[in-house]
Image (spheres, grey):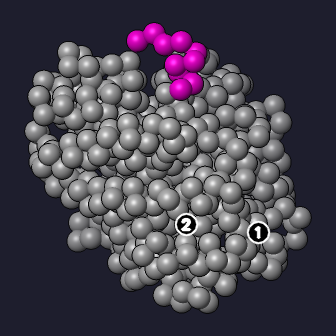
Amino acid sequence: MSLTREQKRAFRALLFKHQDGIAITATIPVLERYAVFDFLAEEKVTSVESIVEKFPKFHAGYLNVSLRSLASQGILKYSVTTDEVRIDVTPKFKNFQYHIPHYVHFNDLFRYYYDLFKNPFAFPLPAIDTLISYAEYWSDTKEKLHADSYFQEEVAFHLEGVLLAPLLVHLGYHADLEGIEVSSFLEDATLQKLLQLLELHDGTSLTTKGNFLFAKSYAYGVTTSYMPIMRHQETYLTGDFLPFFEQDHLGNEQHVFRGINVWGSGGSHATYFNKFDAVLVDLFNKPLAQQPKGIIDVGCGNGALLEHIFDLIWHKTQRRDDLSTNELILVGADYNKEALLSTKRNLEKANVRAEVVWGDIGNPAEIDAKLQALYNVKLEELLNVRSFLDHNRPFNVPKGSYTGNLLSTGAFAHRGKQLHNADVAQSLVEHFEKWKPYIKHHGLLFIELHTVAPDVVALNLGKTPCTAYDVTHGFSDQYIVELDVFLDAIAKAGIGIDPTHSYHFPSDEIATISIHLIQ
């Protein structure tokens, strides 16, 4: 499929706006039901603390995440100081209020998709008439409001995302999982009807839009994997959400469909793996005595990064000639047992020998002890690599006070409680201090996810998935900070940052992903 640069830009914007829709649609009906929007309209300027005082049923931490997500869409203005989080309404707010009923209507789709993902895969899709009715509503409303630019440029894409993205994920994930050709799904006449309403099928074959979105279905995977949070948003905001942080009798997480998460992240992150190449080629072309004994990927997910690294070393470095006499130790570590099984299975399929070990990123000393006991190797003897993990660590209350000048604009929560941004930054400093002894010899090479200030995101709608990631990670107690705050924490931990291996995506202004080598 050959696309022009303009088509690629338009379809990428579509992907991001679809995810924006998933992120904000779940929270809007709850805030509307409790009259929070009416309060904001009346006050014009307020604070998170004042809103919680007015609506004490809300958990401050998750309410803060919700309000910030709306600020990232330009509906509110969000300002963080050392004393408060201030909330202002914007000129867009009144238009947004007018369209709230559409979001309330589409919110019921989260119930449908949650049940769909919970049950064994079946095709044709159960109750697909439900999806068709939403598609007809979407199509009819688009036509009716053809002159409403706000609806056409933002709201319509949000609603389409809630309807379409989980469907593409469901089909794409199970097609990959069970070796099914996606094209076989398209033979179903009812699915064709649904796709035609959404402009993905022309009655004979997929449209250009349809081909692009089916091929990129994995790009929705991470956001959609948090369907349990979207489905139970009111519980998170006002009820007893703690059971979602527990595991079921089989050891599965309750707040996320981890298999879908691993599948989506593996596909989406593959683009960035090649940026590791320059560092790895350099390291494994050095004299053998100067090379690490191997590589450990903490937070190994589905093993894709380890597989990529092994292939690179095999094909592009001199270390290949020494592998028969000096084994390259590959270790996948993860907190999730399903991820460890996925890593082991995928690497065996790729004929890559690797070990796996359960490990908590917040406790490198324990990982080191296990490596020595199981494999007779020290953590410091390995090159540490990891992708999108440091923000996903248990929050430890900092022992010291933050002395930095950079205050994150993020919204952070731990079990519903609002965290002060200075404490989040200091906790990150102390996290890296724990890792410092284990990366001083061979370093830590990582890809990390970052937030961007809401006012900047609002000026770049369709250019970043930041809103979706802030919501999914905020409600699951993860701590995404801005790139400059992240790098400042590393420096404050006394760890060096290699300036020759520093990459920011998609740009310095809206850097949501970075790659660095530190030691």
The residue that appears at 38% across and 18% down in the rendered structure is 208
| Residue 215 location (% of width, % of height) | 37, 26
Q: Nearer the viewer, residue 467 or 225?
A: 467
Residue 103 location, quadrant: bottom left
Q: Is residue 229 above or below residue 271?
A: below
Query: Seen in the image, is 379 located left or right of residue 431?
Result: left
In the rendered image, residue 508 lying in the magenta stretch gets the answer: no
Label 1 crowd (10 A; few <14 / some 14-19 / many >=20): some
Residue at mark 1: 80
Q: Secondary structure at mark 1?
A: strand
Q: Nearer the viewer, residue 295 or 270?
A: 270
Q: Label 1 sits on what residue type?
A: Val
Residue at mark 2: 66
The residue that appears at 72% across and 34% down in the rendered structure is 507
Q: Are marks 1 and 2 in contact (CB under 8 Å)?
A: no
The residue that appears at 33% across and 28% down in the rendered structure is 199
Query: Seen in the image, is 484 located left or right of residue 41?
Result: right
Q: Nearer the viewer, residue 30 or 241?
A: 30
| Residue 203 location (% of width, % of height) | 20, 19
Task: Measure the C-alpha gap from mark 1 to mark 2.
Answer: 15 Å
| Residue 19 location (% of width, % of height) | 47, 46
The residue that appears at 21% across and 46% down in the rendered structure is 133
Q: Is residue 212 above or below residue 459?
A: above
Q: Nearer the viewer, residue 315 or 376?
A: 315
In the rendered image, residue 5 lying in the magenta stretch gets the answer: yes
Instruction: From the image, give the main secondary structure of the stretch colored magenta.
Output: helix
| Residue 123 location (% of width, % of height) | 11, 39
Range shown magenta: 1-10
Whether residue 472 is visible here, answered yes or no, is: no
Residue 60 location, quadrant: bottom right
